[in-house]
Amino acid sequence: MHIAITGATGFVGTHLSQFLLAQGHHVVLLGRQELADDVLLQQQLQGIDGVINLAGAPIIARWSDSYKKILRSSRIDVTKKLLDAFSLLPKKPEFFISTSAVGVYDNAATYSEHDTPNASDFLGKLAQEWENEALKAQEIGIKTVVFRFGIVLGRGGGMMNKIALPFSLGLGGTIGDGSQKFSWIHLDDLIGAMMFAINTPSAHGVYNLTAPNPTTNYEFTKTYGAIIHRPTILPVPLFVLNLLFGEGSTVLSDGQSVLPARLLQEGFSFTYPSLELALKEILSQPN
């Protein structure tokens, strides 16, 4: 297949592109230049079988008013631009996969796709708006899938890359008391779920992309430390995160408990359903 990807230089995008190329697919990278030029974007999308939209500025940052605009533009505006381009194509893509986050839910309970998104904070509202924009591709006859990502765990990037050094030095610890929920997905299962969605004709709509066993920040921390045989006794005080990131610290200090009900019901099999399995695989080899 010919598959176009936005956000292909990020952690997930890099690994997904490499996987697709290894499987014999042709990958077209849609970067800032292509997304800024309507004519160039149209040219790049000619003859494309599908589009995977991974674009989005990093959320772990200090959210000034100007950065909130960047967070929104990199998600909503990019998605709108893609849909505008799709509508003008003589041959439309067969599928469109876009992303969202489990932050559409609050932290009061455990949720599946059968529950209505209920988060009322900035990120929750942003994710819901992003989903609604992406799903408009269905209106022009394109099979559309939206994946709500949990925290992505994998070698060589993302969260695991950021915490590797302090944990290896015995300086790892919980965030606050560690009670916040922690819904996660192994990178291999993330890519597997995307291929499942592409190759399953009936797959459409919104899916929670998390492992079937959500946990807590405390359990993640203790499991990580046990596997690498390092102590995890130094918690990160919440006020430190607030000093560093302000409102953006909620990404680290808050969390959701989310189940991938639709993937399980439709027959997707997780290679890493448990946190211990996932971390043992990731930590068994150097980054």
Image (tube, rainbow, N blue to C red):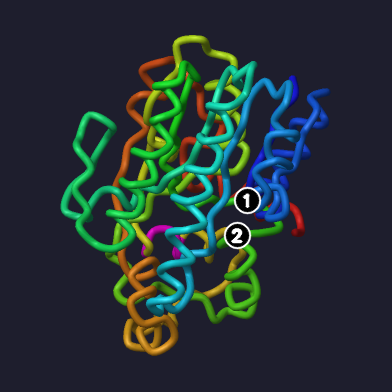
Residue at the (33%, 59%) spot, across then down: 123
Instruction: Give x and y (percent) for residue 85.
Output: 58, 34
Left or right of 107, for residue 2: right
Q: Is residue 164 left or right of residue 134?
A: right
| Alpha carbons under labels 2 and 1: distance apart | 7 Å
User: Where residue 167 appears, x then y in whole percent?
Assistant: 58, 73
The residue shown at (39%, 31%) is 135
Q: Choose between 263 and 57: the one closer to the eye.
A: 57
Give the camera-side residue of 131 and 16. Answer: 131
For the C terminus, the quadrant is bottom right
Say whether residue 147 is left or right of residue 230. Answer: left
Label 1: how many Cα within 10 Å (few below 14, some 14–19, many 20+): many
What residue lies at 80% left-to-right and 28% top-to-bottom?
26
Which residue position holds label 1? 154
Q: Where are the magenta residues, as a range?
A: 218-222
Q: Is residue 69 magenta?
A: no
Q: Is residue 276 above or below residue 72?
A: above
Type of amino acid at the residue the image marks with label 1: Gly
